[in-house]
Image (cartoon, rainbow, N blue to C red):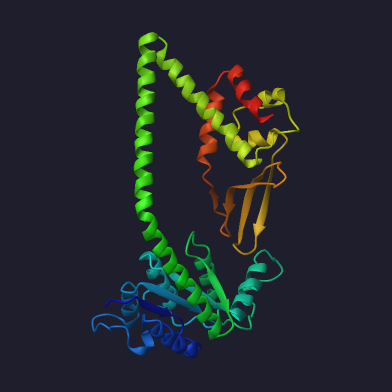
Amino acid sequence: MAVPRVFISSTCYDLKHIRESLKYFVKNIGYDPVLSDEGDVFYNPHSHTHDACLDEVSNCQIFVLIIGGRYGGIHANSTESITNEEYRIAVSNNIPVFTMVDASVSADHYLYQMNGKNTLIDRDKVTYPASDNVKIFHFINEVRKKSFNNAIFPFRNFLDIETYLKKQWAGMLFDFLLRAKNEGQTAITNKLLSDLSQASRKTEELVKFVYSKLDEANAETVINSVSEKVNAEKFVSLVLGMTGGSTLNSTDIERLLKIPVDKTWYEYLIESSDFEEDEQYDIEEDVVYRSLWSPSINNYRMVLSKTDDSNIMEDINNEDFEESFNSLKRLDRDTQKEILSKLL
């Protein structure tokens, strides 16, 4: 019977006892542990040993990453460590990754991040008590900045690791069983939604056909106008969603109509006097977030863009707001007034 193969990736010398304990833990739950220092990797006579380790990763179903205080050996064809390259292969093959970091190294990493904007010192030249190379912190950042599968668990001893993996793998099995149970229900729901969408399209086409027969000259203009109005009303719904359903108190319809519509949707909301924009530095992620804050009691926050430590700015996709606001721009003043009044 096939069983999951678990690749255990870490530096070997400093984490030898952790790796040994992990090997027996994985065996005891019926899985097959794969450790390079135990002869579990096939060292192809025609390949470098480093490449043999990377090749073995893709043959596994689970990847356990342990980050300790030593950066480890550099891969033969890279500037990064062998462990780092093993992790990248796991990610590229969509293998579930479970990452754990020595608690002392995690504390060093936090100090490193805290000094990211400190101009008085060069954080890369500081001696960190539990870490022998700042590249360890870069590696940790690479893991946690992934858009998914980026959880990192700090451990003090093997018991912490064992407890964490038991919970995570139990959760993974539960999720698998739940997905299997819901597959049938999802198929039925998708069929109903498909039928409903098809019926809606048929109704829309019939309405267009009937109207075109009644008023052939203006049919296309009227139909497009109705479509624009419906889409513009979506902008109001999205804004009220940000405010928790609360209307805008510190403005009026005349002010809303006077604000130039050549602005972006968020600039328009800021000028309505109820919304605010700010920038905040996130120490953990080492990025600056530019956000829009709603005037609601809950103070809803929408991220507009983020700038990383390389000063590369990434605009966050808020396509629904942009498209519906563009529809609002194209409407006549009376229709704009009718729609915007719903914000008050």
Q: Nearer the viewer, residue 29 or 92?
A: 29
Residue most extreme to the right = 250
Q: Nearer the viewer, residue 61 or 290?
A: 61
**Could you say which quadrant of the image residue 210 lies in?**
top left
In the rendered image, the quadrant that contains the N terminus is: bottom left
Residue most extreme to the left = 46
The answer, for residue 344, to whether it is visible in the render is yes
Q: Horizontal placement of 297 versus 260: left or right?
A: right
Residue 271 percent location from the top left of the image: 69, 33
Residue 53 percent location from the top left of the image: 34, 79
Q: Horizontal placement of 31 versus 311: left or right?
A: left
Q: Nearer the viewer, residue 323 or 308?
A: 323
Q: Which residue occupies 50% across, 67% down?
A: 143
Q: Nearer the viewer, residue 296 or 80?
A: 296
Residue 250 percent location from the top left of the image: 76, 33
In this rendering, the answer to whether 231 lies above or below 159 is: above
The answer, for residue 79, to whether it is visible in the render is no
Q: How many labels does the image show?
A: 0
